[in-house]
Amino acid sequence: MTASAAQGLEALQPTHHGNWEPRRALTLNAARRRTALVSLLRMIFAGGAIAISLLVIAQMFFGSQGGSTESTEAVSTDVRMLNPRFTGRDENLTPYTVTADSAIRRSDSAIGLTDLDRPRLEYDLLTGGGAESLVLAESGVYDPSNRIIDLNTEVNLNTAEGYSFATDHARVYLREERVVGEEPVDGNGPMGQIRADRFEIHDGGDRVIFEGRVRARIVQDRTDTATDGDGN
């Protein structure tokens, strides 16, 4: 073999033969690093999934607890009573009794306001003793803390002396032995008839005040002719 041919064969031989093993080692190290990174990411994702699952479970648990509280609050709504009966005494120790067909105690009222259906009041406020008065209305509101009864719609006040008053509103102040009506009132009794825009009853019924357009029909004697009168 000639020298030129030998040189040609040497040119075909791979150069830097000794660099192949280090490159292979570098490739294996990179693969191992990637494998470690993938394993780390898997652990992170698995931990995150566990944390999210625990968070969801905790929210469901506390949500169920909150639902129980809301259910308890829902139960504590307005209290409805059938044939209720409220008793008490005014400042002069005069007894009174409030009854109704039904009543609803308002849950959002701090003073115990109670809505009454067809309320009735047995109380000698209007008579000053002896037989008790009876007040009827279609609806009303009882305030036990302030001892006030609001009567609304077709209010009728009847006294033992045979007098009756009809109006659409009357407020009874049990503590003060006073009744105030801001709606027109019609009154009938042994002395005749009276109509006015407003009225007030004071001093336990000893004094009655009519205001506004007052019109009275007074009967002096059953055998006499009735007389009419107007006043303010």
Image (spheres, rainbow, N blue to C red):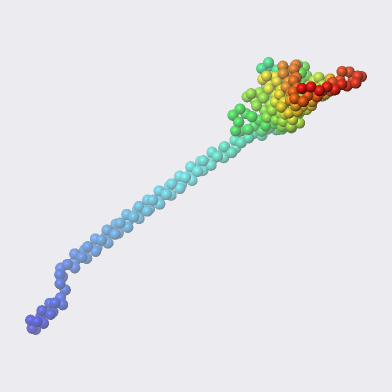
Seen from the viewer's position, the closer of residues 183 and 45 is: 183
In the figure, 27 relative to 110: above or below?
Answer: below
Q: Position of residue 15 (x, y in %)?
A: 15, 72
Q: Residue at x 70, y 17 (%)?
A: 94
Q: Is residue 72 above or below residue 38?
A: above
Q: Residue at x 89, y 18 (%)?
A: 221
Horizontal relation, residue 46 to residue 90: left or right: left
Residue at the image point whose x is 65% and y is 27% from the top: 143
Residue beneath the point at 69% across and 26% down? 149
The quadrant in which residue 36 appears is: bottom left
Rendered image quadrant of residue 157: top right
Q: Nearer the viewer, residue 31 or 100?
A: 100
**Is residue 156 among the parts visible in the rendering?**
no
In the displayed image of the protein, which residue is found farthest to the right? 223
**Quadrant into which the N terminus falls:** bottom left
Q: Quarter of the image containing the C terminus?
A: top right
The image position of residue 69, as x and y in percent, is: 54, 38
Farthest residue, direction bottom = 1
Judging depth in this view, the residue of 102 and 35 nearest the camera is 102
Spot occupied by residue 60 in the image (x, y as percentages of width and height): 48, 46
- Residue 162: x %, y % from top left: 82, 21
Q: Which sits in the foreground, 22 or 174?
A: 174
**Residue 6 can be seen, yes or no:** yes
> 30 above or below 116?
below
Q: Quadrant of residue 144?
A: top right
